[in-house]
């Protein structure tokens, strides 16, 4: 269980997204929710663009900054950053299918937070 009483960040995000209500959250929960939502959407856009063969360097930078801003265990951070760096390397070699795979793995890692 994390500091906001949720076992998984994605579960909280999905529930709040469906309800469209964040008014009942504390300021800290609200910041966390919004950062997670922006991270999830940015990763999804990055997957879509990469799958189309578009290396979106600004999106990679945005995801890196968001990952740094979200509290998570060191092992999760290391794995998430590893997937992101693998995706960057794959994109630089124009191996967009492999990069998309890495970004999907990153998305799953973020969902488990």
Image: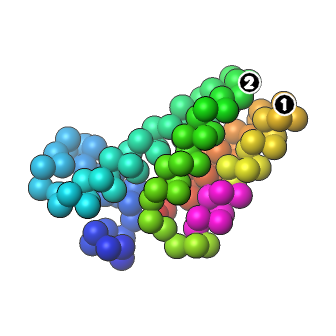
Q: Are marks 2 and 1 in contact (CB under 8 Å)?
A: yes
44 left or right of 55 in image: left
The answer to whether residue 96 is above or below residue 13 is above
User: Image point 28% across, 69% down: which residue?
Assistant: 4
Quadrant of the image occupied by residue 93: top right
The answer to whether any part of residue 51 appears in the image is no
Which secondary structure lies at badge 1?
A: loop
Q: From this viewpoint, which residue is outermost toward the left?
A: 24
Q: CA distance from mark 2 to mark 1?
A: 8 Å
Name the quadrant of the N terminus: bottom left
Give the mark nearest the N terminus, 2 or 1: 2
- Magenta stretch, main secondary structure class: helix
When asked about the image quadrant of residue 71, the answer is: bottom left
Q: Which residue is mark 1?
A: 94
Residue 77 is a magenta residue: yes
Classify residue 69 as left or right of residue 94.
left
Q: Which residue is mark 2?
A: 53
Give neighbour class at mark 2: few <14, some 14-19, many 20+ (Cα, 10 Å).
some
105 with respect to 86 (left or right):
left
Asked if residue 45 can be seen in this view, the reply is yes
> Magenta span covers which residues?
76-82
Image coordinates of residue 57 in percent, x first then y, are 67, 32
Residue 15 or 38: which is nearer the viewer?
Answer: 38
Residue that appears at 26% across and 60% down:
29
Q: Which mark is residue 34?
A: none
């Amino acid at each position: 269980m994390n500091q906001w009483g949720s076992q998984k960040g994605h579960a909280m995000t999905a529930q709040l997204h469906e309800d469209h209500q964040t008014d009942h959250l504390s300021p800290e929960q609200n910041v966390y929710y919004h950062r997670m939502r922006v991270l999830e959407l940015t990763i999804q856009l990055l997957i879509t663009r990469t799958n189309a063969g578009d290396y979106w360097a600004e999106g990679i930078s945005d995801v890196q900054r968001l990952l740094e801003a979200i509290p998570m265990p060191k092992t999760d951070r290391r794995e998430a950053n590893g997937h992101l760096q693998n995706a960057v390397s794959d994109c630089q070699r124009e191996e967009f299918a492999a990069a998309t795979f890495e970004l999907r793995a990153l998305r799953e890692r973020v969902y488990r937070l």
